[in-house]
Amino acid sequence: MILIAGLGNPGEQFQNTRHNIGREIVETFGKHHDFPDFRFEKKWNARVSEGRSGKEKVAVLLPDTMMNKSGNAVGPAARFFKTKSKDIFLIHDDADIPLGRAKLSFGKHSAGHKGVESVMRALKTRDFWRFRIGIAGRRDIPAEKLVLKKFTPDELKLIKKIQRKTIEAIEATSTDGPDYAMNNYNSQ
């Protein structure tokens, strides 16, 4: 089983912020594939839905923890589903990548992303996949403020494109494998 976790912060006040781009992509992916409505799993403090993408069984997870505690949901869910780390995909914001760009990587350091660090601690490895969605805009804004900014209407156009591209790449991982998806996703 593949586990796809969309990192972000729960609550309406965080919707459409840069920090929640991963969470929103996972929600869109679930709807796109007609997965059942998300159900709350108290033992993981997360919302989850299950379905299929291509030939693979997939669980999509939305931690209801704050970003910095994402591992508290991803770790227990991975153990429950008996998902190997190579079959775990995080989708999260990345302030080092320009807005409208994205990268798929495997086994990389967190680059200071607290949500990713939390997941690494919970899984006791960094050998999992990460869809890193660029949110960088102006460089004169501190990262703590940048991640909580909402997207402007012009930026939302770029975000819609990257959402579609990411969903296509997730689908490609289940049909053609993550290495194929990475080559195509990173080259665009």
Image: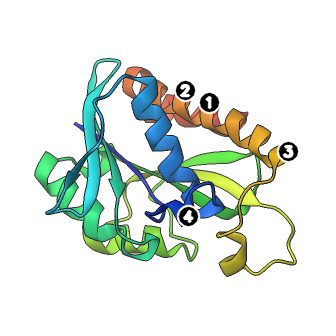
CA neighbours of label 2 inside 10 A, class few (<14), some (14 to 19), many (20+): some
Query: Which residue lies at the image location 72% right of the left edge and 71% below the top edge?
Result: 146
Image vertical order of residue 48 relative to residue 140, above or below: above
Tell me the quarter of the picture where residue 118 sits: bottom left
- Contact? badges 1 and 2 (CB < 8 Å): yes
The label number, if any, that marks residue 164 in the structure image: 1
Of circles 1 and 2, the one toward us is 1
Judge from the rendering whether residue 143 lies leftward or rightward of residue 166; answer left or right: right
Query: Which residue lies at the image location 45% right of the left edge and 41% below the top edge?
Result: 27
Image vertical order of residue 184 relative to residue 144, above or below: above
Quadrant in the picture for the N terminus: top left
Of circles 1 and 3, the one toward us is 3
- Is residue 124 visible to the viewer in this orientation of the structure? no
- Contact? badges 1 and 3 (CB < 8 Å): no
The label number, if any, that marks residue 80 in the structure image: none
The residue identified by callout 3 is 154
* Measured Cα–Cα span from mark 4 to mark 2: 25 Å
* Measured Cα–Cα span from mark 1 to mark 3: 16 Å
Give, as a three-letter code, the residue at label 3: Asp
Of circles 4 and 2, the one toward us is 4
Query: x%, y% of residue 9?
Result: 47, 65
The residue identified by callout 4 is 14
Judge from the rendering whether residue 103 lies leftward or rightward of residue 141; answer left or right: left
Q: Earlier in the sequence, mark 4 or mark 2?
A: 4
Of circles 2 and 3, the one toward us is 3
Question: In the structure shown, which secondary structural element does the residue marked by tag 1 occupy?
Answer: helix
* Measured Cα–Cα span from mark 1 to mark 4: 21 Å
Question: In the structure shown, which secondary structural element does the residue marked by tag 4 occupy?
Answer: helix
The residue identified by callout 2 is 168
